[in-house]
Amino acid sequence: MAVMRSRSPAATDAVLDRLIAAEEERFLARTPRSRALLDEAVGVLPGGVASSWQSAPPQAVWLDRGHGSRVFDVDGNEYVDLHNGFGVMLVGHAHPAVVAAVQQRVTAGTHFAQPVPDLLPVARELARRFGLPQWRFANSGTEATLEAVQLMRAATGRSRIVKVEGSYHGHHDTALVSVYPDLDEAGPAEAPRSVPEHGGVPEPVARLVSVVPFGDLAALRRVLDAHPDEIAGLLIEPIMMNVGIIEPPPGYLEELIEECHARGVLVAFDEVKTGLTIAPGGAVEHFGVTPDLVCLAKAMGGGLPCGALGGTEAVMSRITDGTYEQVGTFNGNPLTMAAAKATLCEVLTPAAYRHLDALRERMVDGARRVLADHRLRGYVQAIGAKGAVIFSDRRLRDYRDFVAYDARWGHAHWLYQHNGGVFLPPWGKCEQWTLSVQHTVDDVDRFVANLERFAETLTA
Ligand code: PMP
């Protein structure tokens, strides 16, 4: 990993370390109220946060409110929000259509655990976008992938699941295998070991999960052939989005579906991140491939907790006939459905996607120009509303490449953007930006200007 011009790698390393230290200091000086709340919170919230990944170094930033493309922290700092709640807020904050739908619903009762009419336009719109006829609802991405895993097992009468090394699918047992494994435990790159993510995942569960490298059909074939009649399904992010952004090699998704189907193995796309954000019909539309199941969450609910599972007639009939009982007290919750209906049918229109495309192009062009002008190592990977600057001289293809990429770059860039009034998702190396329909050219230009200052500092 290096930067450029005349600076040696060792000198660049030293600059990067100094830059992180200085930017963390600025960051802490700008967020004293967050610090005070954190100090109060540690007594009642482990680590002072509601979810462990909210606690990114140097400290969690406590937010007060969001409007349009901007969020405001408890210290009064304003940010262009490209974190967007880990990609949920594709509609932007407090979008008038979502606000109106939620306000109307909240005065007419928010929960019955009985079907409500809004289920129909939401299910129909998802069916239209993803080309899968039947849908059920859940309350998070974790629930959506958990349902997919259990349904694939119930439908096939088999127990084994295949997943990709370095993919995150939420926090149920089967999903928490080889997400970010240590390389000294992870075995050879072409035949990774199944590593439980933490002590809460029992070894026997991990043993029921086979792990393959992304983009490697030969490795997948070996796993499929090693376990004849044992594998229920493959759960896969069609584009890896918890290791920056890694797109699949051409033809990979089509072929993996063929290989799986030839052996009676089902395929579920985890489109929790890609669904709705990279195209109106997610990876299914973008790549023109249809798996047996699609898992959605995040952007679908316009900011309310949500999840969905779409499937073919054949697989979803196993819910209809009772082979698999897909259940949940809050499934199809009226408030979520009202927000989802407004999101899908009123906000995420073809014009909205054209706006997102134009902003992305401007952002990508600007970022590429900065990298080129300053001869900063790295590349820009972007698709739909999503994108990332990956400060690696090699294009990442899979988890092993991702591990070799120095995390300090993503962190330094994240800090730099933050202090410059742009809120990217924390964990810079793993995450990507999400634009919203309410972002503007000025927002995008602020991101590019910050990147330029970052490049200047590193190359000066
Ligand atoms: N799948 C993917 C691809 C994700 O990125 C995530 C969350 N980042 C999940 C599933 C889990 O979603 P949730 O946090 O809503 O449970």
Image (cartoon, rainbow, N blue to C red):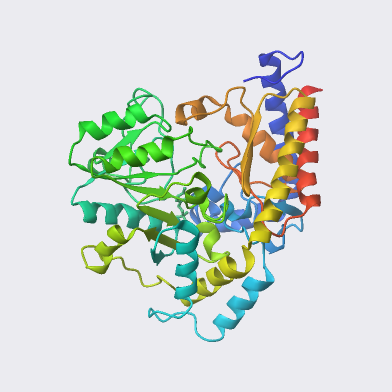
39 in relation to 116, above or below:
above
At x 40%, y 33%, the residue is 181
377 in relation to 163, above or below:
above
Q: Residue 267: horizontal and vertical position, in percent?
A: 34, 47
Q: Residue 440: horizontal and vertical position, in percent?
A: 77, 54
- Is 64 positioned to the left or the right of 193 in the image? right
Q: Between 436 and 458, which is closer to the camera in this rendering?
A: 436
At x 51%, y 51%, the residue is 285
Numbered marks: total: 0
Q: Residue 199: horizontal and vertical position, in percent?
A: 33, 42
Q: Between 358 and 143, which is closer to the camera in this rendering?
A: 358
At x 68%, y 63%, the residue is 64
At x 54%, y 66%, the residue is 304
33 in relation to 263, above or below:
below
Task: Please state, as top left, top right, bottom left or bottom right, where the N terminus lies in the image.
Answer: top right
For the question of whether residue 114 can be seen, the reply is yes
433 in relation to 405, above or below:
below
The residue most toward the bottom is: 108
Image quadrant of residue 370?
Answer: top right
For the question of whether residue 58 can be seen, the reply is no
- Is 379 positioned to the left or the right of 41 in the image? right
Image quadrant of residue 449?
Answer: top right
Q: Residue 347: horizontal and vertical position, in percent?
A: 63, 66
Image quadrant of residue 154?
Answer: bottom left
Task: Please state, as top left, top right, bottom left or bottom right, where the C terminus lies in the image.
Answer: top right
Q: Between 202 and 312, which is closer to the camera in this rendering?
A: 312
